[in-house]
Image: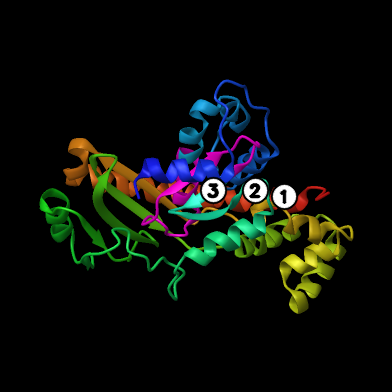
Amino acid sequence: MSETTTRQSATRQSGSRRKDTPAQAPSDATGFQRLLNTAQIDADVTGIVADPATADAQLTALLREALDRWGYGLHHLEHRAALTDAGEIQLFAGKTPVGRTGEDSEHLARSYASLSAPNADGLSDWSVLGEGWRTTIKSQAQLRVLIEDARDFETLWTPERGLFLRIWRRTEGGQEVTATEYAQPVNATQLLGDAAWDAIQGIKDRALQRELMERSAKGGLLQAFLSARHKDAERNLGSLPETHFTVQSSVTRLTGEDARDFAAVRAAQKTTADALKAMQERAVRGMVDLLRSDLR
């Protein structure tokens, strides 16, 4: 089925689009904004949905950027976001409806996780190209040959810079693209545990601090910290997107001459790895601030 036919089908399923009537800011816009925040992406979603004629393309680009960072490894699927006439923002992975951004974040996270195929290290086992040969990165000389001379190719995950790296080339939007992806699987629950440690260490009441550390031996750091908050803290925390989505990967795509320039790809490797490390550090700091907040 062509992309045009798929889009038309999705529109029929979700309601026709009125191009001539300015859309009201839907509740789904707030949900999408909060999802983007978990991927550390700045965007004015309310402003985007105010122009339905261009909303789909902009929302789709933002969704794909977020998926590059959430680390589900679903690059083999065509991801779309569609604004309906009812003000909903529906998310699709290929032809599969994943959900809508106004619904429960835990449900959305489960939907994306159900499409993923993590290996024992938490890295995606999905082939980006869908089919074909995948190779191990054996040396920089071999990688240079792939980048400068190969047609479409894809490497297996390779430990590098304290992270995991894979590189692939394929045609996207009619142009040749060489992509570099670094991953460090650390889910939101793990980050919350790290954040709870930092939050407990920041408590000035030493007696309370010792008490929480003793409680953590039984139920874990996060549970110990939440036990000292109000009764709804744990439930309210679980309803937030930050507790289900976080940054686990970073992708840089090179096009044109850079797609076959070994030096450009090597430079992209460094900036991509540095970006991932910086985003994950910010994610932990954000979790600490979240735990220290009122959680109401």
Residue 32 pos. (x, y %): 61, 42
Q: Secondary structure at mark 2?
A: helix
Q: CA distance from mark 3 to mark 1?
A: 27 Å
The mark that comes first in sequence, 2 or 3, is 3
Q: Quarter-wise, where is residue 222 in the image?
A: bottom right
Contact check, label 3 and label 1, Cβ < 8 Å? no
Observer-nearest of 216 and 253: 253
Magenta extent: 61-89
| Tag 3: amino acid | Leu
Q: Residue at x 66, y 43 (%)?
A: 31
Q: Is residue 197 left or right of residue 58?
A: right
Does 42 sit above or below residue 145? Answer: above
Nearer the camera: disc 2 or disc 3: 3
Which residue, given by chain and number where applicable, does mark 3 sit on?
91
Q: Nearer the viewer, mark 3 or mark 1?
A: 3
* Label 3 or label 1, whichever comes before in sequence order: 3
Element carrying mark 3: strand
Residue that badge 2 annotates: 286
Residue 191 in percent (x, y) is at 61, 60
Label 1 belongs to which residue? 290
Q: Which residue sits at x=31%, y=51%?
A: 180
Q: Nearer the viewer, residue 244 or 99?
A: 99
Neighbor class of circle 3 (other Cα within 10 Å; few <14, some 14-19, many 20+) is many
Q: CA distance from mark 2 to mark 1?
A: 6 Å
Residue 227 forms part of the magenta stretch = no
